[in-house]
Image (cartoon, coloured by chain):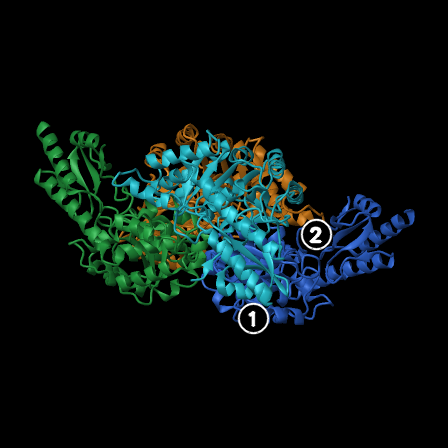
Chain colours: A orange, B blue, C cyan, D green
Amino acid sequence: MKYSLKNDYSEIAHPLVLEAFAAVGSTQFDGYGLDDFTLGAADRVRAWVSAPAADVHFISGGTHANLTVISSALRPHEAVIAPETGHIFVHETGSIEATGHKICTVKGTNGKLNAAEIDAVVKEHGDEQMVKPRLVYVSLSAENGAVYTKSELTEISGYCRKNGLYLYLDGARLGAAINSNACDLTYADISGLVDAFYVGGTKNGALFGEAVVICTEGLKADFRFLMRQRGALMAKGAVIGVQFEALLKDGLYNELAKHSNAMALKMAEGIRKLGFDLLYPAETNLFIPVFPVKIARRLQELYWFYDWQNFGDTVAVRLVTSWATPESIVHEFLADLEKLKNEN
Amino acid sequence: MKYSLKNDYSEIAHPLVLEAFAAVGSTQFDGYGLDDFTLGAADRVRAWVSAPAADVHFISGGTHANLTVISSALRPHEAVIAPETGHIFVHETGSIEATGHKICTVKGTNGKLNAAEIDAVVKEHGDEQMVKPRLVYVSLSAENGAVYTKSELTEISGYCRKNGLYLYLDGARLGAAINSNACDLTYADISGLVDAFYVGGTKNGALFGEAVVICTEGLKADFRFLMRQRGALMAKGAVIGVQFEALLKDGLYNELAKHSNAMALKMAEGIRKLGFDLLYPAETNLFIPVFPVKIARRLQELYWFYDWQNFGDTVAVRLVTSWATPESIVHEFLADLEKLKNEN
Amino acid sequence: MKYSLKNDYSEIAHPLVLEAFAAVGSTQFDGYGLDDFTLGAADRVRAWVSAPAADVHFISGGTHANLTVISSALRPHEAVIAPETGHIFVHETGSIEATGHKICTVKGTNGKLNAAEIDAVVKEHGDEQMVKPRLVYVSLSAENGAVYTKSELTEISGYCRKNGLYLYLDGARLGAAINSNACDLTYADISGLVDAFYVGGTKNGALFGEAVVICTEGLKADFRFLMRQRGALMAKGAVIGVQFEALLKDGLYNELAKHSNAMALKMAEGIRKLGFDLLYPAETNLFIPVFPVKIARRLQELYWFYDWQNFGDTVAVRLVTSWATPESIVHEFLADLEKLKNEN
Amino acid sequence: MKYSLKNDYSEIAHPLVLEAFAAVGSTQFDGYGLDDFTLGAADRVRAWVSAPAADVHFISGGTHANLTVISSALRPHEAVIAPETGHIFVHETGSIEATGHKICTVKGTNGKLNAAEIDAVVKEHGDEQMVKPRLVYVSLSAENGAVYTKSELTEISGYCRKNGLYLYLDGARLGAAINSNACDLTYADISGLVDAFYVGGTKNGALFGEAVVICTEGLKADFRFLMRQRGALMAKGAVIGVQFEALLKDGLYNELAKHSNAMALKMAEGIRKLGFDLLYPAETNLFIPVFPVKIARRLQELYWFYDWQNFGDTVAVRLVTSWATPESIVHEFLADLEKLKNEN
């Protein structure tokens, strides 16, 4: 079997998550997330992100969370600002546009936005001939594995507040980001800086599920209606609540993210030691080394992973580790790479 | 603890389903439902419904399945015909309208449509001043627990085919229906009569999830795009595949439905023996007895269940059993009811 | 040529309207309704409806006005309440649903809503399983020609304000209503009682165009963005402004409506004198007599008009007069009817 | 009064158009474009563009035509390809996205697309994680006044047909383009090369209105339903038909476009003779000279026109002539410019 380094959602779920389902036993619970498991998990999330007044909702996946939050926040003519690498712009099949809203993109730097770029978009959208930018989308960690620093996110947040824009953070890989050495943000910082975000479970050990946190009063009203309408309010909402309880109660969520990051950093370091460059600094559990095409293709006979960008003779590839990646795989991968290097 | 007879999604999941997750172990799988678990489960579903050429997709919940299938089938001006009791019309928060489509309702009889009613809607929608009915929605079992007979569904199907309408069947409780003594339809009959339907897992022992079956060639194209756009293509699609494999492989799905039905019928029969009427014949795992208000209120101190309709002195209430309802609860409920009857 | 009594938009435009275009000559004007003609006409409308603080916008047709206002006012899960005869529900091809919103209907009495019916809808929409009613739609005059009285509209308005619902009035035939003897409402009353409405030009002498009046502060923001997005902000917005200036400046608008009403009432009275019933009292320029089918069919060889409802041996037909209907037609029609009556 | 060179929709309408309204007199016509004026005008358009089998519909404005055609052609996950300068992408307030569809942009050259760019977009949209490009949008003339040549449009058309893409042409300024010396395309060529387009009236002498031509069989079905739903089917449809009859019957449409182009070319040539550059070759009635900022600002005290792009010391400005621009204005403008040049 080829080992997959394609993504961080290739394994079923951490055993403690599965045990948590079993522990429910024959206990009955209310439908649609009004049960004690969900309510308890929401409290747990609020404590985890230090946002006692936030509303917390559980949604089965990231795209679904993104489209539900964003379409809840905007009037028909209002638009999103996102980096052109943003997941909602590139890889969610027009889900935001399907709810009626345009995404205005900016180039970004290393997959990250900054206030000056946002301001340029705002400034060029002057009147009713154009959409009205109203919400800024950032992902943490970003699609290329990069993290925002506290100072970077604070600057964006400050700009948004001053200019009447909502700031929404896609936290599919929030655990990896917060537990990255390159990131000086805490969960509490996030709660304080953005209007809404989600703590991603799918990519960090859950069977599935994300915890949406709505910090801003103005975005709270009727959110359950929006969820229900978009098919995002599960009849058995408890099923996600149970998982977040398991992930957060003893810090498992951070542990898993740390492991995942550690595997990536070890692999990235090994790769650099073998003389290959990284396209960006390795900061989380996703990094992008550049290999000669010949070596990359041979590696892809041994491991699953995606190309990121072609440069002719060389190719940047995306390597992703997960909460379940064994350290032995890191060593094997590096050994295989060394062997291929020597052969070429 | 009060026992809940509110619905059939109050318990976490059948133990064999949870075991199936555990059995996956550290096996890696591809994302977005392209993995072997999902592909295998799709084969299993095709065999189960005797539709070897059908496309099968797994979606996390019923509302999400409904809106994804229906919005995929219709052009902007095309509309749905549904009974005015239909779940999509009443209890899904305008999810179909949110995708841009009107639902034209008919009265129905006992929660069920018939061809004459559909024809009346088609006939009154003559030109471009009105929407164009294009898809008929039925649920099996219906919202009141009733089942369509083979002859009833065949008549509707015949009408739809003759008149260029798609027929879509919401199978949230398909197991209960097919395993009902009142229903002479088989899964194979359904596949032959409708254009698309789903086999409901959430309400029959799964942790969550529904298997959408697309029988008609014209509805197959690009369905995965629609799923992705609506947030319905789970990153860990395997998670639903694993469950359907567990539910279908040895007929567990039918066993659970039979149990659920049996508990309801036993309870319904006991209730009638105690001298109370049912609003409709008890056919599946949901039935609607009529109690004096005083008795209903006392019962609601002992059990959770919903009122269905008020008649002044009496009230019809909705009782739902599940795959997990123990027979002892049936006896307790009837004993409690008898006691309350004697006291009043 | 058969004369048409089908509707009130069968003639090109009142000559004074056409003269107003010619009077513009080679004067240049700004685009998108920012020109002096439009601004002046907006002032004229504000004065006309005694709403000095209202926002006024001009839109080319009624359906377009309805969908733009309604989709501007609602969040995705919010719904409209309308009588089941309401134009937006029956004859606008799902235009509201196409913007994502459900219409909840009530039976109505003579095509008119009342507060009790609205309240019943509000009460049954309790939680996030259902849409949230947020805007009430009334048309004045109604689709059957009926008018609301001041007391009726005041009751509805009071209910809406108390219960957080917007009240929107479709004024396609507002002139006919306000100038009806059966209607004790003034334009100023309308401005005071509803949140938004439009003064219909298309059906009262304009070449085309409606004047949307937004009374409520909360509905004003960014309305031009919504117009632009829906294709409702004409490049040559002045074209509608010029018309409303011509229609309102010397009261032509009321004169035309009065003429139209007078022709209808004269015809209705004549019909009754000939022994035929009306389905509703004749109040405006649209009324609905009931004829033996045989007579109706013979009349339809001489005049164009629509059937309204079939009763077997008799049929109710919809007769509509316009600002351009000559009195001679009324006499001819009655003479023809008398002749047919005598022959049968 | 400052003369406006802002756009080509600053004057009310050509006198023959207004006369055509008057000529209708008291003739009654059917509603919703089913009248003889509209049917006759549709025949006239079919002959004009040499497309006897095409469907022709009249819509009040360009944005409205664009959104109605495009949303009629696409399934929910399908997207548009347009140049990033495309009117639908920049200046129609997200109208396409509001119908649920993403626009994928390419850089373009001088505001024009080519097949290689389209192909690049198609190639990078591989699976259901991304939208599916399905319709290519071009405008003729383009937003910067440029025209496609026959060979350029043929190449795009060939690519589209080979790859299953619809080709839609926004003809807001089609008259200016076809009557440009730089353009070797005929109306008949357009009909043969694209799937749908519109012949713009608003910007070429009409009071308002565009004639949508649907050439491809697959886009014809139910288009009137779509028009009605979007508010684009005018009750008095005849009002646009009457205008197109007047514009096309003796070739007035081409005459007006030729005049407009001639005024622009004369002005552009004079500007170049005075030593100023043009950003693009002047080809139609819209061109973009580059002036020192100081001169531009002084000119803007005398004439209305928009800045197009700032280059620091110089600024490109957009000058637009119309069917109504008198030659004397050209001379005055050039005289003023020369004077300003000499002063600076």
**Up-down: is D109 above or below A127?**
below
- Along the viewing direction, whichever of C204 and C215 lies nearer the viewer: C204
Chain hosting mark 2: B
Q: Secondary structure at mark 2?
A: loop
Q: Residues within 10 Å of mark 1 (few under 14, many from 20)?
A: many
- Counting residues from the start of the chain, the first of labels 1 and 2 encountered is 2
Quick check: can you spot residue B198?
no
Camera sees residue D163: yes
Residue B88 x %, y %: 60, 54
| Residue D233 in picture, x, y percent from top left | 42, 54
Amino acid type assigned to the residue bearing label 1 in the image: Ala
Please give the residue where the numbered disc 1 appears in the rendered image: B51
Residue B302: name its quadrant: top right
Q: Nearer the viewer, residue C289 or B132?
A: C289
* Residue designated by label 2: B7
In the image, residue B142 lies at what x, y percent? Answer: 67, 60
Q: Nearer the viewer, residue C312 or B165?
A: C312
Residue drawn where x is 42% and y is 37% of the image: C248
- Whole-percent x, y for residue A329 in the image: 45, 51
Q: Amino acid at mark 2?
A: Asn
Cα–Cα gap, marks 1 and 2: 30 Å
Q: Nearer the viewer, residue C192 or A311?
A: C192
Q: Secondary structure at mark 1?
A: loop
Residue at x 55% of width, y 34% of height: C189
Residue at image location 71% in from the left, 47% down from the top: A27
The image quadrant that residue D253 belongs to is bottom left
Q: Which mark is residue C81?
A: none
In the image, taking residue D56 as reference, residue B290 lies left or right, namely: right
Indicate the chain on which mark 1 is placed.
B
Q: Quadrant of residue B111?
A: bottom right
